[in-house]
Amino acid sequence: MSISWFITTLLLLHSCTPGVGMDHGIVGGKEYIPHSRPYMVYIRDKQTHKACGGFLIREDFVLTAAHCKRDHLMVYLGVNDTNHLPEGIKVDAIPHPKFDSKKMNDDIMLLKLKKPGTLNKTVNIIALPKNKISSNCMVMGWGLQEYNGKFPSRVLKEVNLTLLRSKYCAIRHNLCTQDEVGPALGDSGGPLICGNVPQGIVSYYIMNEFTNYLTMYANISYYLPWIHKIMNPTL
């Protein structure tokens, strides 16, 4: 990474109670058609109310970031507005065994739902990647409306981003984007969708002196063997 990158690495996990404020949502993002991303999952610790995003990859499994692990996680399916949450589902958290919270390596986690979700118009799965990654991507979440702001969005927002070449990503097995817009605190664990396929998981960002943000995502394709092993242990 260039020496121009500096200041700090910020985990994208937000400590505010959801349901406050509503402007741009994910930084620079806009609200799309409500429930048009039925695979999106709202994740929250029922005691601290710390929140993350995630996405449903099977009726009983959600994919998210390992640094989102908390003691009392609940997942909420079919959410658009966090002021109107359905009944939460308890989960068993399975972070990647090599996750390093200091270096932020292997920041990926599966959540096993104790009660499988019911698939319908507002709740559905998204298939794991198989093909070459498109550079035209988008990211979505319920996180902060400004990088240094105070309030998360109560409705799901999304923004388009362009994937950078891998040489610009400082940590192994990561994808990255760079812009003045993108995921912020509270958007951790959400998907980076490229060509309608989830290719990355929001992990963290680094800010430089030009106030651009290099955002890192766990590269899902690299972790497919681990994902399939956890989801299908008898195979």
Image (cartoon, rainbow, N blue to C red):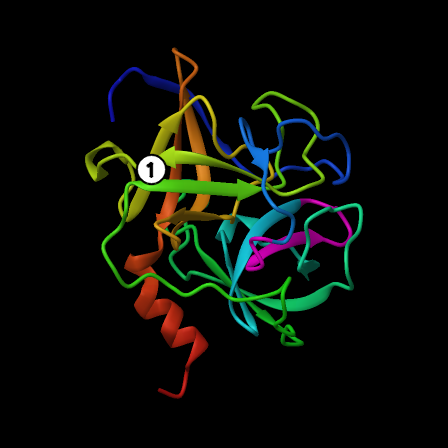
Residue 186: x and y in percent read 60, 39
Residue 94: x and y in percent read 51, 65
> Three-letter amino acid code at disc 1?
Cys
Left or right: 212, with 28 as reference point: left
Type of secondary structure dominating the magenta stretch: loop
Question: For the magenta stretch, what is the residue range?
Answer: 36-50
Residue 19 shows up from this direction: yes
Q: Quadrant of residue 224?
A: bottom left
Q: Label 1, secondary structure: give it.
A: strand
Residue visible at 38% across and 38% down in the picture: 216
Q: Which residue is mark 1?
A: 176
Residue 22: x and y in percent read 72, 30
Left or right: 85, with 161 as reference point: right
Residue visible at 25% across and 60% down in the picture: 131
The reply to whether the magenta stretch includes residue 116 is: no
The reply to whether the magenta stretch includes residue 38 is: yes
